[in-house]
Image: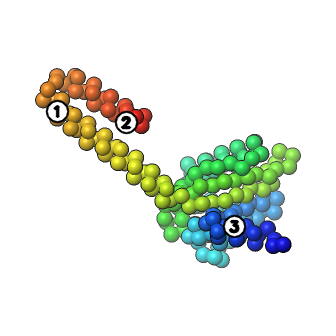
């Protein structure tokens, strides 16, 4: 039977996920080949506490710490999305699943997977921007039509309703 790392490595390649492991007791961080590729670092890169956190901005570091806390509290794997800046300064969106091991209320190990979700996030951003652009065009068109037909106070109220609907995602 293959050892666990080899099984994980094969799974990682098949499903295009990166595997990572932080052993807090031994102070060792492991990134597999796919994780290194995702973060755009060389194969010889050795992650440690300092250099591995440089890829995550403050906001996303808080999200990551919250994921770890929830995983520790619930003792189940937790899913979240993060934005990273790779070694080549590329902004990527990743999905993270993490699990925590602990003894006597002390976290001893954090491990999980990363999956590149950049294309999916970019499609979501493009769709959102498209809706905003459409709302602006509708609002400007309404402004022209309504200003010709109605008093200014009614025109402003209609525009406020359009802005409110755009903010709530109603179409």
Q: Residues within 10 Å of mark 2 (few under 14, many from 20)?
A: few
Viewport quadrant of the N terminus: bottom right
* N-terminal label among 3 and 2: 3
* N-terminal label among 1 and 2: 1
Locate residue 30, reporting x and y percent. 72, 66
For the residues labelled 3 and 2, the Cα–Cα distance comes to 42 Å
Locate residue 44, reporting x and y percent. 65, 77
Asked whether the beta carbons under mark 1 and mark 2 sit within 8 Å of each other, the answer is: no
For the residues labelled 3 and 1, the Cα–Cα distance comes to 59 Å
Locate residue 143, reporting x and y percent. 20, 33
In the foreground, 103 or 130: 130
Asked whether the beta carbons under mark 3 and mark 1 sit within 8 Å of each other, the answer is: no
Quadrant location of residue 139? top left
In the foreground, 5 or 49: 5
Placement of 2 over or under 84, stated as above or below: below
Residue occupied by mark 3: 11
Q: Which mark is residue 145?
A: 1
Placement of 127 over or under 118, stated as above or below: above
Q: Which mark is residue 110?
A: none
Judged left or right of residue 148, residue 110 is: right
Locate residue 11, reporting x and y percent. 69, 67
Q: Residue furthest left?
A: 148
The answer, for residue 142, to whether it is visible in the render is yes
Asked whether the beta carbons under mark 3 and mark 2 sit within 8 Å of each other, the answer is: no
Q: Which residue is painted at 22% across and 22% down in the image?
A: 153
């Amino acid at each position: 039977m293959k050892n666990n790392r080899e099984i994980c490595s094969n799974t990682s390649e098949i499903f295009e996920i990166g595997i990572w492991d932080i052993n807090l007791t031994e102070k060792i961080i492991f990134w597999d080949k796919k994780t290194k590729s995702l973060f755009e670092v060389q194969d010889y890169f050795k992650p440690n506490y300092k250099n591995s956190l440089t890829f995550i901005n403050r906001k996303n570091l808080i999200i990551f710490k919250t994921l770890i806390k929830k995983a520790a509290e619930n003792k189940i794997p937790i899913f979240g999305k993060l934005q990273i800046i790779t070694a080549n300064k590329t902004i990527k969106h990743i999905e993270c699943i993490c699990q925590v091991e602990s003894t006597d209320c002390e976290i001893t190990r954090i491990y999980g997977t990363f999956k590149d979700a950049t294309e999916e996030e970019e499609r979501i951003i493009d769709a959102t921007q498209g809706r905003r652009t459409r709302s602006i065009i509708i609002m400007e068109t309404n402004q022209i039509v309504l200003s010709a037909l109605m008093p200014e106070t009614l025109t402003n109220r209609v525009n406020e309703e359009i802005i409110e609907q755009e903010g709530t995602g109603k179409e």
